[in-house]
Image (cartoon, rainbow, N blue to C red):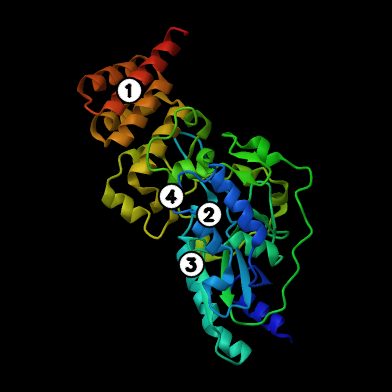
């Protein structure tokens, strides 16, 4: 058995679904593309995503002295179908239905690396990355043959589609590089056509400031009013560009127990989220990616989803939020009431307008009243 075969077999035995190797040379093409995205304003909102970081993340030899190879590993998180969306429910991206993948994959990668010396017969220098470090995971996955880059910028694998989470190990092992795949998306543009916010502005180019995943997770302030109606019922992340991708039709499911769907996580009831306090939020979303949105962000997103849902039963819960919550959530509760409309919603908005002291929330209430009254009188 060759060294490559031994390492791959060992990685698969540790629960990884796909393994590929590439050299530690710079990802020059990927670095240039990322720099262009920043300069074109498509990464606005990510203050940490600087040109200096881009250069670092695309140069493995700067991340580990003596680096010779990168081991790219993919793990499927595809499992059960989502629960019903009937009623006042929201939707959450599939990768967040189970445990926090950062913790799961880092633990698995550490165990994998700890066992490498026994496989190769010497000590092995290495460094682990799972999405949140200065390493270009997708560039490594592409060049190692794990998958190819789709027009939505996700890595697409022949066996597991794009429902994979990536991990990388930069190492001083001399491994024979795998060849990149020759597959492409061809003329397919389903992901571009079906993105409700038009975030995929060109093949292989995503404007993060329009992406529902960015808006529901990373954005800390007000969601732009023009984008709120386009977000539908997504309250954490978005899977639309993956759901419509033809490659994913026959994707093989994974069997990682930690990624299995937690009860009520795929399509959660929205009103309980509005009523949640910090202690309940921290307990419910312990070891979950969803905690990244923070309580205020998740409640903001729930307000938008309820506004888009249009169910009058949400008026009273939204009114409670409008009168009692923090300004960020109040402003989006006002918008939601304006979308639902009707006398009860108008009354709640007028009552809130009399007591509101935050100027930008006052503006949101006035705009919501205009929406509600415009609908009522057919304007």
Numbered disc 2: secondary structure: helix
Q: Is residue 333 left or right of residue 205?
A: left
Q: In the image shown, does 142 or 291 lie closer to the viewer?
A: 142
Pointer 1 or 3: first along the chain: 3
Using the rendered image of the protein, determine whether residue 163 is visible from the camera's viewpoint.
no
Pointer 2 or 1: first along the chain: 2
For label 1, the residue is 363
Residue 47 tag number: 4
Residue 36 tag number: none
Location of residue 372 (image quadrant): top left
Pointer 4 or 3: first along the chain: 4
Numbered disc 4: secondary structure: loop
For label 2, the residue is 95
> Would you place residue 169 above or below residue 166 in this image?
below
Location of residue 201 (image quadrant): top right
Single out the residue that lies furthest toward the bottom: 121
Question: For the residues carrying marks 1 and 3, which lies nearer the camera in this image?
Answer: 1
Question: For the residues carrying marks 1 and 4, which lies nearer the camera in this image?
Answer: 4
Q: Is residue 204 left or right of residue 225?
A: right
Image coordinates for residue 22, horizontal then vertical, percent: 68, 71
Residue 104 tag number: 3
Name which residue lies at 57% across and 53% down: 80
Question: For the residues carrying marks 2 and 4, which lies nearer the camera in this image?
Answer: 4
Image coordinates for residue 13, horizontal then vertical, percent: 62, 77
Q: Are marks 1 and 3 in contact (CB under 8 Å)?
A: no
Please tell me how crowded label 1 is: few (under 14), some (14-19), or many (20+) other residues with Cα within 10 Å.
some
Question: For the residues carrying marks 4 and 3, which lies nearer the camera in this image?
Answer: 4
Please tell me how crowded label 4 is: few (under 14), some (14-19), or many (20+) other residues with Cα within 10 Å.
few
Pointer 1 or 4: first along the chain: 4
Q: In the image shown, does 306 or 128 lie closer to the viewer?
A: 128
């Amino acid at each position: 058995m060759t060294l490559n075969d031994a390492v791959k077999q060992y990685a698969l035995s540790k629960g990884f679904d796909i393994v590929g190797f590439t050299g530690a040379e710079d990802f020059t093409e990927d670095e240039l593309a990322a720099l262009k995205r920043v300069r074109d304003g498509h990464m606005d909102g990510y203050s940490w995503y600087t040109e200096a970081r881009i250069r670092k993340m695309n140069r493995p030899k700067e991340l580990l002295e003596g680096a010779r190879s990168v081991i790219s590993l993919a793990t499927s998180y595809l499992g059960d179908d989502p629960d019903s969306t009937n009623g006042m429910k929201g939707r959450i991206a599939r990768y967040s239905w189970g445990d926090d993948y950062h913790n799961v994959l880092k633990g698995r990668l550490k165990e994998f690396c700890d066992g490498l010396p026994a496989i190769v017969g010497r000590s092995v220098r290495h460094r682990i990355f799972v999405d949140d470090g200065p390493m270009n995971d997708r560039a490594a996955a592409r060049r190692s043959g794990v998958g190819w880059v789709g027009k939505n910028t996700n890595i697409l694998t022949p066996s597991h589609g794009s429902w994979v989470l990536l991990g990388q190990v930069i190492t001083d092992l001399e491994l024979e590089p795998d060849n990149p795949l020759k597959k492409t998306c061809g003329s397919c543009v389903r992901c571009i056509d079906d993105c409700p916010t038009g975030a995929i502005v060109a093949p292989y180019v995503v404007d993060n400031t329009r992406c529902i995943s960015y808006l529901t997770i990373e954005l800390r302030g007000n969601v732009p009013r023009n984008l709120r109606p386009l977000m539908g019922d997504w309250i954490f992340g978005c899977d639309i560009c993956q759901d419509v991708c033809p490659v994913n039709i026959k994707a093989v499911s994974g069997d990682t127990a930690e990624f299995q769907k937690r009860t009520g996580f795929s399509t959660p009831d929205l009103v309980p989220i509005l009523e949640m306090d910090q202690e309940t939020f921290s307990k419910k979303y312990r070891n979950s990616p969803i905690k990244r949105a923070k309580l205020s962000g998740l409640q903001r997103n729930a307000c938008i989803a309820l506004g888009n849902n249009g169910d009058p039963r949400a008026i009273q819960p939204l009114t409670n939020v409008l009168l009692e919550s923090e300004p960020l959530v109040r402003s989006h509760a006002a918008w939601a009431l304006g979308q639902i409309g009707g006398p009860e919603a108008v009354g709640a908005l007028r009552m809130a307008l009399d007591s509101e002291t935050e100027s930008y929330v006052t503006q949101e209430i006035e705009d919501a009243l205009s929406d509600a009254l415009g609908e009522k009188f057919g304007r």
